[in-house]
Amino acid sequence: GSAGPFRYAAPVDTLGGIVGAGLHITPDGAFYAWQGERAFQLSEGIFQPVFEGGTVIGVDDAGRVFAFDGETALVDDGVYGPAEGWAAPTRPGFTVRPGLVADGEGSVWVATSEDVRAFDGDSWTVYTPESVGMRAPQTDGENRVSRFVLAFDGANIWVGECTLDGGQPDGGIGARWFDGETWQGNVFPTFTGCVTAIDVGPDGRVWFDVDITVYDWNPETGVFLPHEFPQTVPNEADFFGVIEEMPVGPGGKPYRLKTLCDGGACDAGRIRYYLLLDEDNTWVPVTENRTRDHLIFSESGRGWLFLDEGVFTLSQGATQSVVGLMVTAAAFSPDGDLYVIGAFGSQAGLWVLEE
């Protein structure tokens, strides 16, 4: 079957549902999907189970499944606890953020609600805020938690933190970067503040937020450029929450997805803006108040936007509808083909874009 330009490629019945599903395609072309505590590999046209245990965090380029079971980390069949460097949680409600970051030196990094951690293939190293030159986050209080984020810019691992109170941003301990030997960043503007997103542009510049300002960092000059963000919120919200993602498109323009907060909760929707990079630092709305809003760019710079209504292309802030395919996960193959897990009407599956 087909859904517009997307061709049905494989069933996903074995996943037990596609909401919350993940998808990763390795450099050698192996397809992995996961849902909850199970992971699958595509084999002979069927997603076959390859892992079941803890909550799956992601799959790396070597095809290793990373998961967390509440106390220990799992990597394929290996179990990693304190003896293998995986420190036990020190606070209730410990979580591991979905997603893996590889550092180019063979280690895979994850962000938790207390710190960031790197796996070298044999054991874990835990980097607490204090060990990377940050102060301890102010998380005293029943509803106060830390939210760490990670990124790799081709040379440095970046880590940022924002402290949330009842889901709302309430300060933070800034950002740092690691060049493989030392942690840096105890300078303005990264030494303190709420950092909720870090992304790297095609030109190598690193984009991140500190409180209400977005900065870009030029690795060649070491200069931080501020881009003030207007605080005028849509009528249906009281104020902005966190940045859920901020992919950087052609021309080095970031597209930030900001949550909206209403009263005591930050579940009033989300809105995406992109930066024109003009003299006025103009931020232009792209999408408004969606529950599903995810954006990825191909190597050629074409934007693919997955919304409640389906799939859209994105160019210079303008969207164009492609097909009403409800996508829950997307990835590019080594050949640059776009694959998605989604549903078209009642037909759920793995789909590939045919251009």
Image (spheres, rainbow, N blue to C red):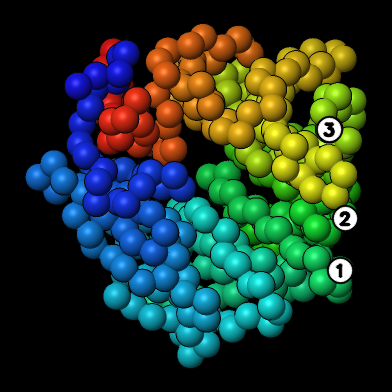
Vertical arrangement, residue 175 with respect to residue 70, above or below: above
N-terminal-most mark, 3 or 1: 1
Give SS at disc 2: loop
Q: Identify the amino acid type marked 2.
A: Gly
Q: Residue furthest bottom?
A: 83
Q: Local crowd at mark 1 within 10 Å, few (<14), some, or many (≥20)?
A: some
The residue where tag 1 is placed is 138
Mark 2 to mark 3: distance in Å? 20 Å
Q: What is the quadrant of the N terminus in the image?
A: top left
Q: Is residue 255 left or right of residue 86?
A: right
The x, y position of residue 308, in whole percent, is: 53, 27
Give SS at disc 3: loop
Please identify, in this view, whether the residue under mark 3 or under mark 1 is nearer the observer.
Answer: 3
Q: Local crowd at mark 2 within 10 Å, few (<14), some, or many (≥20)?
A: many
Mark 1 to mark 2: distance in Å? 8 Å
Q: Which mark is residue 171?
A: 2
- The one nearer the camera, 179 or 313, is 313
Q: Is residue 208 left or right of residue 141?
A: left
The residue where tag 3 is placed is 237
Q: Are dots 2 and 3 in contact, CB under 8 Å?
A: no
What residue do we see at 79% from left, 48% from top? Answer: 265
What residue do we see at 16% from left, 46% from top? Answer: 46
The x, y position of residue 106, in whole percent, is: 41, 61
Q: Are dots 1 and 2 in contact, CB under 8 Å?
A: yes
- The one nearer the camera, 263 or 28, is 263
Q: Identify the amino acid type marked 1.
A: Gln
